[in-house]
Image (tube, rainbow, N blue to C red):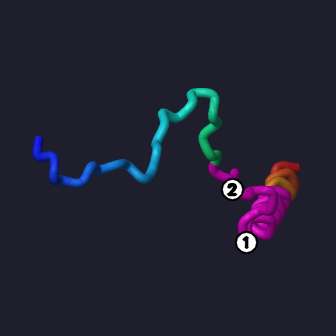
Amino acid sequence: MDDSAPEIIPTICTSARSASTPTPSTPTPITSSPSTGSTAMSDVLIERMSVWLSERLAASG
C-alpha cells in the first residue's frame, strides 16, 4: 500500500438491526361505515321480498 495515500475512515457507523425491534405496522382501513347506497339497496330488497310474499300469500288464499 502506498504510504502517501490518505487513510479512508468511515463517517457513518452502521450496526445490525435488532430482532426485537418491531416493524412499522400499516394502519387498518376504516370499514365502520357502509359504502354509499348499500343501506338503501338492502332496504329496497327487504321491501321487495315483503311485497312478493304478501302477494304470494294473497294469491294462494
| Residue 55 visible here | no
Vertical order, 17 against 27 (above or below): above
Identify which residue, 61 or 11, lies in the foreground: 11
User: Which residue of the protein is positioned furthest toward the front in this rendering?
Assistant: 3
First in sequence: mark 1 or mark 2?
2
Q: Which residue matches tag 1?
A: 36
**Left or right placement of residue 19 versus residue 8 in this view:** right
For mark 2, does the 10 Å Cα neighbourhood hold few (<14), some (14 to 19), or many (20 or more) residues?
A: few
Q: Which residue is drawn at 17% across and 53% down?
A: 5
Quarter the N terminus occupies: top left
User: Hey, which quadrant is residue 39 in on the image?
Assistant: bottom right
User: Dot 2 lies on which element?
Assistant: loop
The part of the chain drawn in magenta is 26-52
Identify which residue, 18 or 27, lies in the foreground: 18
For mark 1, does the 10 Å Cα neighbourhood hold few (<14), some (14 to 19), or many (20 or more) residues?
A: few
The alpha-carbon separation of the residues under discs 1 and 2 comes to 16 Å
User: Which residue of the protein is positioned furthest toward the top in this rendering?
Assistant: 19
Vertical order, 22 against 57 (above or below): above
User: Dot 1 lies on which element?
Assistant: loop
- Location of residue 38 in the rendering, given as x and y in whole percent from the top left corner: 74, 65
Q: Which residue matches tag 2?
A: 29
Residue 19 on the magenta segment = no
**Left or right placement of residue 11 versus residue 46 in this view:** left
Identify which residue, 37 or 28, lies in the foreground: 28
